[in-house]
């Protein structure tokens, strides 16, 4: 215990949104410190992480690596898909926060956000990866609660608030009251599925194979959930599936909206199912409080309007939606004595 406290003197406690698409790091007393893609580049033969092989630089390598290098996304559907690479990614962020000038190896306490539908096995994998990466203690918090706090909702009040967090791997929908989740659904359809729908549409309609980064660029540039006042178009490049040669074609926002319709309807279905299971008094609160959207998926054009029309409730996008979950982990971190009894921990209290 004394040794741990000594390590703590040279460590900065961290809150982490360990996302499928991006990892966002909050440092206690400082705020959001890093936001990087959840991608790690490794040498195929040795398995060693490349220098500058984590985050944005590694994402640039996706689909462009020679046979000797592999760019890996260690998180899938909001949970760990590659245990060893996740550990390397967490170690990277711990080292980056602390730098090289410490008397002892840093051993911070970590608060990590996890999907509400995670299994016990998946939960243990997160704890184990974090401990092996150098944490001295790990706290796990449900993503919807973290997102609600980071969005500035008064979750401790005896009134209902609904949050819909659309990340890369999961869509987390929850009604929160008295600082806990009253009703929730964790759907493993989110931003990555929007990208994949675009990939499949381009194959089916144009016999053109595009990469996941190109699909994401199309989604951000011209994607929408409802008709736009001025429809958009863009030129897209890829590989012709028939000739096997590079080719470009022009796609419109109407076409991409058609491609995205199925996963969007699945997300709206999760919101509706959660509302159907909500207690009447909390439902009455939601008439006034509405639905708060956060996560990268909430930035899709027209999504707020579609959610509002489908539910009859007012919907809004949270301020700084990409960082809501990480800010929520930070708020828990800043008030650990108050909240530690309500979140999962890696071991007994010190």
Image (cartoon, rainbow, N blue to C red):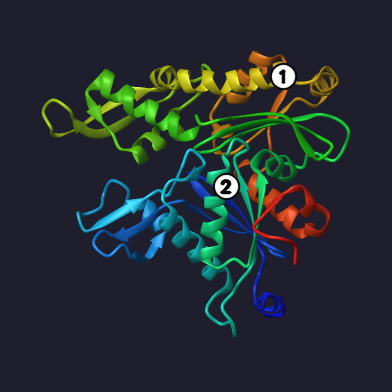
Q: Nearer the viewer, residue 61 or 229?
A: 61
Indicate the quadrant containing the N terminus: top left, top right, bottom left or bottom right. bottom right
Residue at left offset 33%, top offset 65%: 48
For label 1, the residue is 277
Distance between the alpha carbons at the discs numbered 2 and 1: 25 Å
Residue 208 x/y as whole percent: 23, 27
Instruction: Name the mark on residue 123.
Output: 2
Do residues under tags 2 and 1 come within 8 Å of each other at their CB atoms?
A: no
The 10 Å Cα crowd at callout 1, few under 14, some 14 to 19, many 20 or more, is few
Mark found first going from the N terminus, 2 or 1: 2
Whether residue 297 can be seen here: yes
Q: Is residue 162 above or below residue 50?
A: above
Whether residue 225 can be seen here: no
Q: Nearer the viewer, residue 175 or 209?
A: 175
Picture quadrant where residue 200 is located: top left
Residue at disc 2, secondary structure? helix
Taking the view exactly as shown, the residue that stands out farthest to the left is 243
Picture quadrant where residue 114 is located: top right
Residue 299 x/y as whole percent: 57, 34
Residue at left offset 80%, top offset 27%: 289
* Nearest-to-viewer mark from 2 and 1: 2
Indicate the quadrant containing the C terminus: top left, top right, bottom left or bottom right. bottom right
Residue at disc 1, secondary structure? loop
Picture quadrant where residue 275 is located: top right
Residue 273 x/y as whole percent: 64, 18
């Amino acid at each position: 215990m004394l040794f741990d406290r000594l390590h703590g003197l040279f460590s900065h406690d961290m809150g982490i949104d360990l996302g499928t698409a991006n990892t966002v790091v909050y440092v206690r007393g400082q705020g959001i410190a890093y936001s990087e893609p959840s991608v790690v580049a490794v040498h195929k033969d040795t398995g060693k992480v490349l220098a500058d092989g984590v985050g944005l630089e590694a994402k640039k390598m996706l689909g462009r690596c020679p046979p000797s290098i592999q760019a890996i996304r260690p998180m899938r559907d909001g949970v760990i898909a590659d245990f060893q690479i996740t550990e390397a990614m967490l170690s990277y962020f711990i080292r980056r926060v602390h730098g090289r000038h410490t008397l002892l190896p840093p051993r911070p306490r970590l608060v990590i956000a996890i999907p509400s539908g995670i299994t016990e096995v998946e939960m243990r994998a997160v704890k184990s990866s974090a401990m092996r990466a150098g944490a001295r203690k790990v706290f796990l918090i449900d993503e919807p609660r973290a997102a609600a706090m980071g969005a500035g909702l008064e979750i401790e009040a005896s009134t209902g608030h609904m949050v819909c967090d659309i990340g890369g791997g999961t869509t987390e929908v929850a009604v929160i009251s008295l600082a806990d989740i009253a009703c929730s659904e964790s759907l493993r359809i989110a931003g990555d599925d929007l990208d994949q729908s675009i990939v499949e549409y381009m194959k089916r309609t144009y016999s053109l194979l595009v990469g996941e980064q190109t699909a994401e660029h199309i989604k951000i540039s011209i994607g929408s959930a409802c008709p736009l006042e001025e429809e958009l178009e863009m030129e897209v490049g890829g590989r012709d599936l028939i000739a096997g040669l590079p080719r470009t074609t022009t796609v419109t926002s109407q076409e991409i909206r058609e491609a995205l319709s199925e996963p969007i309807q699945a997300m709206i279905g999760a919101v509706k199912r959660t509302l159907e299971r909500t207690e009447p008094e909390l439902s009455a609160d939601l008439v006034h409080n509405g639905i708060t959207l956060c996560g990268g998926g909430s930035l899709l054009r027209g999504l707020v309007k579609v959610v509002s029309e489908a539910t009859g409730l007012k919907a809004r996008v949270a301020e700084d939606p990409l960082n809501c979950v990480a800010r929520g982990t930070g708020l828990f971190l800043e008030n650990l004595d108050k909240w530690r009894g309500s979140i999962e921990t890696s071991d007994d209290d010190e």
